[in-house]
Image (spheres, rainbow, N blue to C red):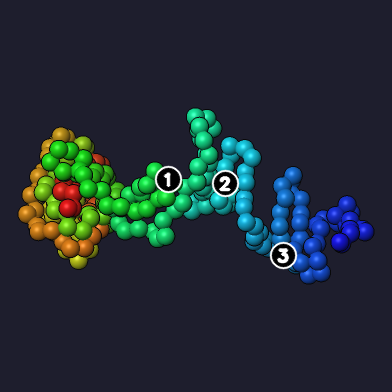
Amino acid sequence: MAQILDLKATSQPSLQIEKAGVRLKNNAGDLQVKNAADSAFTKVTASQFESINDIGLVINSDAATSGADWKITLARPSSGMTANYTLTLPTSAGSPSQVLTTDGSGNASWSTPSGGGSSNGQLVDTTSLAFNSASSVSMFTLPANAVISRVEVVIDTAWATGSATMTVGVSGTTSKYAGSNLIDLYGTAKDIYISTPGEQANASAESLIITYAASTATAGAARVLVYYSNPA
């Protein structure tokens, strides 16, 4: 059995495991695992990781909390649990509009909802539009075989100046569900403009967008409500 005859970490900034092996370091009370050159972090391989408090597992914890570098924390409830359990994730990332379900034994899988948000199986998605929005505003992914029955544009604040326009559709067919001739952004507050597209079900999912031309608008806000059937 190997013995440590000279513990260099008492006088050196890191403890190296084997010749040209990884280094263990202390940084403000935290343990760091670095490569042999002490120039970058290296992975830690283990059969099990256990956190002994309710903080949980923090992902990207060394990043600045801004922009694309916000960190994610996976944590257990701080109270209320009555037993240990294991949650096993699915084997894939799933398909658009699917939800994560469990078999009651901790085995999770992706499934497509079979019911709607109301008794007639109809769902509604809402997207906000402002006078200074981008020229293409992402809405939501319409599931395969769903049918849009109604599009409503509700004016919260009427547009001011310019000649702004908007349509509702998909890339390549920007007026598929509502054309600019049906919507007056310069109406009065609480005006509602309605489109009933009458399109047939599409066999594949669609990413809906608002195509917007701001012109010289200096004020204005609206909501776009899309009513659609849940696919069978």
Q: Does residue 120 sit above or below 63 in this rendering?
A: above
Query: With 85 as the anchor, is 117 left or right in this view?
Result: left
State the mark number for residue 35: 3
Q: Residue furthest bottom?
A: 20
Identify residue for label 2. 57
Quadrant in the picture for the N terminus: bottom right
Identify residue for label 1. 105
Tell me how far mark 2 sits from mark 3, CA to CA: 22 Å
Q: Reading the chain from its start, which is encountered first: label 1 or label 3? A: 3
Q: Quadrant of residue 52?
A: top right
Tell me the amino acid under the disc marked 1: Ser
Given residues 176 and 117, the one toward you in this image is 117
Q: Does residue 72 sit above or below 191 in this rendering?
A: below
Residue 7: image x %, image y %? 89, 56
Given residues 172 and 21, the one toward you in this image is 21
Given residues 159 and 227, the one toward you in this image is 227
Residue at horizontal 72 percent and vertical 64 percent from the top: 35
Circle 3 Cα neighbour tier, 10 Å, few/some/many (<14 / 14–19 / ≥20): some
Circle 2 Cα neighbour tier, 10 Å, few/some/many (<14 / 14–19 / ≥20): some
